[in-house]
């Protein structure tokens, strides 16, 4: 029996599912006594260090947890659950940590994108039960802006490279902590959790890489909506038009398709509720059930988008984006993606120059961390003869001339699934949202959507050069070579596709096989 320390933030459902899948039972700690009587403790942390420490103290969990750890009770802390073991964190300098390990938590200082998001390796430093079922060359899912800096080198269990080498796991007696998320790391993560559950004999894996590398991610995207018969289906548009012969295209069931992509090797799954902008968000949330069911069989990160915004309906009922997002996190989402509302937020911020702290981006980032906030951008090319024609926008030269031979273009942001264009360009939108605390950009392109003609390299380069957060290249993938092209010609951290996967024209596995040996990927 494992006792789960759930302090109420983030996606603990995935941890429960990952443990139960291994045949172990898991019980949430509700009182201090539950912690003190635990056989084994699992502490998954998601969100922000300050909020976590405050809640641990409010609930009266901090002292019993520290007592168990001093007694050397088997413990596994994940991400913030490991940060809590240290003396403090730059993320909330005034709030001390538990101080069981000497050292602090600091923000990444690197030219690479922060947060560090994706699948990276681990370089083991000492034997551990966590390695009992590992080869050593597996990759694990990381998502963090801060990392630990232990003062005592002897506690370092693994190291990982991202710009520089950092400690990615610690071990002192039976107290262990990992920066990555085993519950989101597919079969490798399950193997590590099994070692913890069994309290297996400590060993070193056979393969011990000297250096590790972050993989470029392949993401499968499922656009979901109700069809005319009222069923929730995965659909797919051409330039966002999802109807064919008057009917919504039906390409399958969301939960089944997500599972198929997981089994084929997708590194992440994104669900977009494409008509989510229409209704009162909390009234009917069919995607909650989709997430709950998906998180039972899919052990890679899940992102959900559509309808995440502050909303007041005609009857005066209101809800906040944070409330909507919280429902999604509780149901199994790791990240939420904001589309239309991000455009409104960025335009207001550009006009006032003031960060109110109350926008959906800021509020969700404050509670769940920046890494949980993705901005979904739906731009369309607008051709101009020269940059002077659109002085308020970021205009770029293009090698693909416009209908009248124009050699320049800018990318107009749209809202409501491309139905309405706004006076804001995609590069500026991305920069402003990153300033407000977004952690990742999902960069679609309406002109390329469903076109199978390849990603819009010019758009991706323009956005990538304007932000310091990871960018997901999206729209236009028609063959495996298009993924190689986007990874060779841009620094996008990941690439997303929909149509070719749904129609089985190019399965995820084929993309991976094609890329293997050419770019760093997760096997
Ligand atoms: O505005 O916050 O409610 O979010 C709505 C979300 O739904 C946005 O993320 C928006 O991108 C998405 N969306 C709205 N309408 C559509 C539509 O298609 N009619 N889908 C839509 C966007 C685009 C991509 C697609 C890629 C890859 N889907 O995500 O998966 O273009 O496709 P491909 O590989 O087949 O080319 P809000």
Image: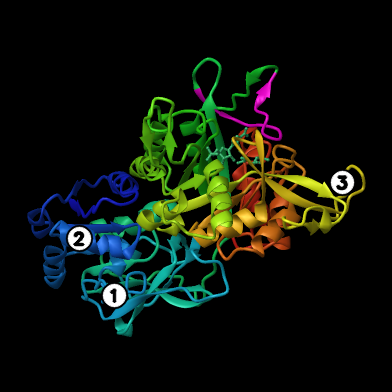
Residue at (43%, 70%) from the top-left corner?
206
Looking at the image, which residue sits at the far right?
A: 405
Q: How far apart are marks 2 and 1 (CA)?
A: 14 Å
The crowding category of the residue bearing disc 3, from other C-alpha atoms within 10 Å (few below 14, some 14 to 19, many at least 20), is some
Considering depth in this image, is 473 or 415 the residue closer to the camera?
415
Name the residue carrying label 1. 88
| Dot 3 or dot 1, earlier in sequence | 1
- The residue indicated by pointer 3 is 402
Q: Which residue is drawn at 38% across and 28% down?
A: 283
Q: What stretch is highlighted in magenta?
A: 232-244
Crowd band around label 2 with a 10 angstrom C-alpha radius: few (<14), some (14–19), many (20+): some
Is 390 included in the stretch rendered in magenta?
no
Queried on whether the Cβ of the residue with tag 2 lies below 8 angstroms from ligand 1, the answer reads no
Residue 519 lies, in percent from the top left, at 65, 62
Q: In which quarter of the image is ligand 1?
A: top right
Q: Does the rendering let one see residue 436?
A: yes
Q: In which quarter of the image is the C terminus?
A: bottom right
Q: How many marks?
A: 3
């Amino acid at each position: 029996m494992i006792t789960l320390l759930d302090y109420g933030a983030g996606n603990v459902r995935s941890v429960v599912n990952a443990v139960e899948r291994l045949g172990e039972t898991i019980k949430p700690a509700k009182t201090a006594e539950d912690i003190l009587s635990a056989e084994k403790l699992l502490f998954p942390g998601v969100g922000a260090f300050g909020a976590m420490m405050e809640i641990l103290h409010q609930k009266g969990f901090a002292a019993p947890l520290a007592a168990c750890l001093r007694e050397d009770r088997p413990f596994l802390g994940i991400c913030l659950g490991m940060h809590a073991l240290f003396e403090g964190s730059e993320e909330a300098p005034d709030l001390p940590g538990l101080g069981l390990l000497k050292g602090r938590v600091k923000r990444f200082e690197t030219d690479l994108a922060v947060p560090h998001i994706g699948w990276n390796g681990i370089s083991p430093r000492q034997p551990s039960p966590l390695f009992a079922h590992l080869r050593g060359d597996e990759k694990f899912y990381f998502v963090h802006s801060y990392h630990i800096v232990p003062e005592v080198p002897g506690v370092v269990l693994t190291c990982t490279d991202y710009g520089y080498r950092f400690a990615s796991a610690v071990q002192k007696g039976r107290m262990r902590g990992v920066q990555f998320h085993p519950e989101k790391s597919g079969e490798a993560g399950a193997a590590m959790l099994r070692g913890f559950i069994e309290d297996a004999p400590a060993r070193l894996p056979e393969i011990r890489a000297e250096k590790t590398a972050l993989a470029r991610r392949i993401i499968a995207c499922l656009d979901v909506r109700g069809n005319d018969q009222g069923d929730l289906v995965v659909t797919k548009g051409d330039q966002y038009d999802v109807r064919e012969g008057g009917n919504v295209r039906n390409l399958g069931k969301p939960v089944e398709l997500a599972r198929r992509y997981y089994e084929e090797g997708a590194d992440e799954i994104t669900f977009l509720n494409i008509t989510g902008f229409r209704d009162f968000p909390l009234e009917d949330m069919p995607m909650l059930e989709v997430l709950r069911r998906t998180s039972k069989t899919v052990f890679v990160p899940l992102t959900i988008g559509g309808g995440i915004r502050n909303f007041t309906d005609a009857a005066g009922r209101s809800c906040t984006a944070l409330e909507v997002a919280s429902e999604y996190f509780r149901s199994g989402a790791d990240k939420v993606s904001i589309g239309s509302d991000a455009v409104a937020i960025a335009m207001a911020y550009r006009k006032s120059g003031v960060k109110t702290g109350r926008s959906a981006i800021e509020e969700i980032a404050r509670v769940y961390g920046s890494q949980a906030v993705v901005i979904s951008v739906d731009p369309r090319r607008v051709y101009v003869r020269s940059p002077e024609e659109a002085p308020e926008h970021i205009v770029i030269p293009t090698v693909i001339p416009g209908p009248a031979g124009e050699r320049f273009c800018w990318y107009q942001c749209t809202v409501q699934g491309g139905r309405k264009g706004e006076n804001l360009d995609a590069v500026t939108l991305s920069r402003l949202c990153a300033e407000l605390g977004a952690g990742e950009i999902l960069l679609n392109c309406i002109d390329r959507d469903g076109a199978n003609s390849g990603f819009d390299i010019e758009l991706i380069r323009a956005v990538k050069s304007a932000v310091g957060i990871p960018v997901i290249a999206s729209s236009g993938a028609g063959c495996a070579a298009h993924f190689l092209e986007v990874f060779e010609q841009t620094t996008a951290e990941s690439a997303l596709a929909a149509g070719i996967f749904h129609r089985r024209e190019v399965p995820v596995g084929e993309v991976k096989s094609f890329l293997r040996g050419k770019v760093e990927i997760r096997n």
